[in-house]
Image (cartoon, rainbow, N blue to C red):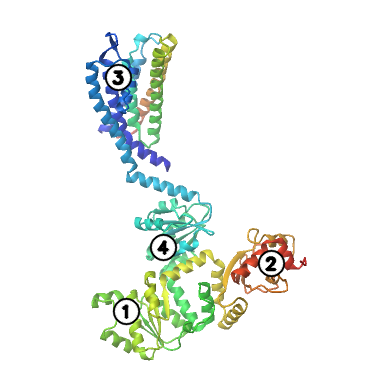
């Protein structure tokens, strides 16, 4: 697109060029025609070269003096006219160039050009993120730099400015552009080999659907991660063969279902998202009747979860916008509201869930319910991340932040594929199995272990691949020995092993390793460091395997 | 019919005709070639070049190229003349033939340009 800039510049410079040429030509011609006087008083005619030389330094206001001889009055009259004539032409030309530099169209073309070049020179795999907001920001924060780079498109110039001020490192190239415009997607590098995927989490399902369709057509190979909040959209995306559809409400529905029926499965899943690996008292979902306030997308999702879990509930239609318009307040709790709450049976219920679209209403609903029944378990939907502090201060038992759930799920899918896989496999198991796993993890690795993902290849496990290439038989149990004393065990647990398309949940410790196996390892930082030492250092590995005695 | 077309068309053709006017005559006798005509040829050619700027079509690019060639040839011709006059202090036959043949080259480029221009005009069916 360099071409385009040149054309813009040339077209704009046409008039200034013409002005300069014409003014110069007239001044030169005049000087040549007017008769001069040389030092001896003889008449002489200036040549074109003399005139050209003089006009050149006169017009550019350099002014070396009168040459080749001092001018006579006829010449000076012409020159005094020519000075104003050419200098004005010259300044006009310079002015045009300066205004060209400030030209919006040119600026846009230049910044688009530099954006395109920047994207072209990214050599790591990268994701294109469409739309910059609190969700995508938290994804960028975690994703950018380590294994991936990020490119951002947003329609809104303010959003892009905001992103620039954020000073991400490494730099996140961003550009103003409509994400549904395929030209913009191309500039953002959708055709590039190292473009791994596109993330579209817009509020509007239609926009997401449009983007998914365009991206699919432009590049079949990339991962398309889209948000869908309705069943229809979900099915539409599935028919398009998109595997990575994120529905935050579906995630909430599943969490409630598992929270009630299988708390340890719930715990393991939540631990993957940063919860500690221990069921606290307030984590237990209560037994009894549930009240759902709000019958929107969130309310329906909760309903689905409760239905599946076989829990008794009542659901109350509640349109937050209508409520605000009618009562002109965002504080819930006049007499009618209290009556409604009592009618729903707050006093006998075990749990109330406020799932409306207004954060303040959600808070006040739960407050009033608590007044009527101090023992009731409260859950709230939080729509905006900014309100987190108020929610935390008001002692609500569980808070569902739609934005955060979406960001976490997307991040896990991209950066921690094994954890994502583990959660999927886990859901097919029963609670007893999960309880055993939790106890085992607690015993070996403590209450708040971390998890790591690694692939056994040349890069991550140099020594191990070397040994495996030589045909050594190495089992998972071998890797669990301490490098300080091989009879001691490291505090690590291998949670999942992925070999090609096969996935082994809690792999047998006698299982023989192969190159390119992927492992999900639970441990703490110190023990994981030891593990990395062992698989990378030949001497450590030989000791652990028992080849040497030192 | 538009003003810009007339302007640029007339300058393209003027560039060729003025160039021819300078070129025409005995190539060894300088007095048959007016320096004013060379000056006019250079100026008109420069203007024609600027008028051709900013046309993004394929034809526009070729037109611009012919014009740039003509400019280079004519300016070279004038430079040789100035150099011979002031530095060599006499304009010999060799210098004269160089001046004239350089402008002859420019004339060829201008002819190509005008042919292309007319061809394009004939091609458009309006």
Q: How many marks?
A: 4
Q: Position of A369 compared to A187: left or right?
A: left
Q: Please say if A72 is above or below A397.
A: above
**Residue linked to disc 4:** A209
Q: Which residue is mark 2?
A: A513
Residue under label 1, please give it: A318
Contact (Cβ within 8 Å) of mark 4 with mark 1:
no
- Which mark, by number, is residue A66? 3
Name the element at disc 2.
Answer: loop
Do the dots labelled 3 and 4 sit on one chain?
A: yes
Q: CA distance from mark 2 to mark 3?
A: 92 Å
Q: Earlier in the sequence, mark 3 or mark 1?
A: 3
Name the chain under label 2: A
Q: Residue at x 32, y 34 (%)?
A: A14
Lower sequence index among marks 2 and 4: 4
Instruction: Decide: is B82 above or below A536.
Output: above
């Amino acid at each position: 697109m360099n071409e385009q800039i040149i054309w813009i510049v040339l077209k704009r410079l046409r008039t200034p060029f013409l002005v300069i040429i014409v003014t110069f030509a007239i001044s030169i011609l005049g000087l040549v025609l007017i008769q001069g006087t040389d030092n001896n008083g003889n008449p002489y005619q200036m040549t074109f070269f003399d005139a050209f030389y003089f006009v050149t330094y006169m017009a550019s206001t350099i002014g070396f003096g009168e040459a080749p001889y001092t001018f006579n009055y006829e010449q000076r009259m012409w020159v005094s006219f020519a000075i104003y004539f050419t200098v004005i032409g010259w300044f006009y030309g310079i002015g045009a160039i300066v205004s060209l530099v400030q030209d919006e169209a040119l600026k846009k073309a230049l910044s688009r050009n530099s954006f395109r070049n920047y994207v072209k020179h990214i050599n790591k795999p990268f994701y294109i993120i469409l739309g910059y907001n609190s969700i995508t920001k938290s994804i960028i924060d975690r994703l950018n730099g380590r294994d991936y780079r990020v490119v951002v498109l947003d329609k809104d110039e303010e959003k892009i400015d905001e992103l620039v001020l954020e000073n991400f490192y490494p730099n996140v190239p961003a550009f103003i552009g409509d994400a549904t415009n395929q030209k913009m997607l191309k500039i953002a590098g959708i055709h590039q080999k190292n473009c791994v995927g596109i993330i579209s989490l817009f509020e509007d399902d239609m926009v997401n659907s449009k983007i998914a369709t365009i991206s699919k057509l432009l590049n079949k190979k990339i991962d398309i991660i889209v948000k869908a909040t309705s069943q229809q959209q979900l099915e539409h995306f599935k028919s398009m063969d998109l595997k990575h559809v994120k529905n935050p409400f579906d995630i909430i529905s599943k969490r409630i279902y598992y929270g009630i029926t299988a708390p340890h499965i719930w715990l393991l899943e939540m631990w993957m998202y940063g919860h500690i690996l221990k069921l606290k008292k307030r984590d237990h979902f209560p037994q009894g009747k549930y009240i759902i306030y709000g019958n929107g997308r969130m309310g329906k999702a909760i309903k689905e979860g409760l239905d599946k879990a076989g829990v008794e509930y009542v659901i109350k239609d509640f349109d937050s916008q209508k409520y605000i318009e009618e009562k002109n307040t965002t504080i819930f709790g006049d007499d009618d509201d209290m009556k409604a709450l009592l009618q729903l049976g707050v006093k006998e219920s075990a749990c109330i869930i406020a799932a409306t679209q207004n954060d303040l209403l959600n808070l006040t609903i739960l407050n009033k319910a608590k007044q009527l029944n101090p023992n009731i378990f409260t859950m709230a939907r939080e729509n905006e991340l900014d309100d987190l502090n108020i929610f935390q201060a008001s002692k609500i038992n569980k808070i569902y932040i739609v934005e955060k759930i979406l960001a976490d799920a997307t991040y896990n899918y991209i950066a921690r594929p094994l954890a994502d896989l583990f959660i999927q496999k886990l859901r097919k198991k029963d609670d007893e199995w999960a309880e055993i796993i939790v106890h085992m993890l607690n015993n070996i690795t403590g209450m708040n272990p971390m998890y790591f993902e690694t692939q056994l290849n040349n890069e991550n496990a140099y020594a191990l691949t070397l040994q495996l290439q030589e045909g050594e038989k190495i089992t998972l149990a071998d890797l669990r020995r301490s490098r300080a004393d091989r009879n001691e065990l490291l505090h690590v647990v291998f949670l999942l092993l992925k070999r090609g398309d096969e996935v082994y949940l809690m792999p047998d410790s006698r299982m023989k390793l192969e190159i390119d196996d992927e492992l999900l390892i639970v441990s703490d930082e110190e023990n994981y460091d030891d593990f990395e030492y062992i698989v990378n250092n030949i001497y450590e590995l030989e000791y652990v395997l028992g080849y040497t005695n030192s | 019919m538009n003003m810009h077309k007339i302007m640029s068309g007339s300058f393209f053709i003027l560039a060729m005709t003025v160039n021819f006017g300078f070129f025409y005559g005995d190539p060894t006798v300088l007095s048959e070639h007016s320096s004013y005509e060379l000056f006019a040829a250079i100026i008109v050619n420069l203007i024609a070049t600027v008028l051709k700027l900013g046309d993004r079509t394929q034809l526009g690019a070729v037109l611009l190229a012919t014009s740039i060639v003509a400019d280079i040839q004519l300016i070279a011709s004038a430079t040789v003349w100035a150099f011979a006059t002031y530095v060599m202090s006499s304009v010999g036959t060799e210098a004269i033939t160089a001046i004239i043949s350089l402008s002859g080259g420019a004339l060829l480029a201008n002819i190509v340009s005008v042919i292309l221009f007319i061809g394009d005009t004939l091609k458009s069916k309006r």
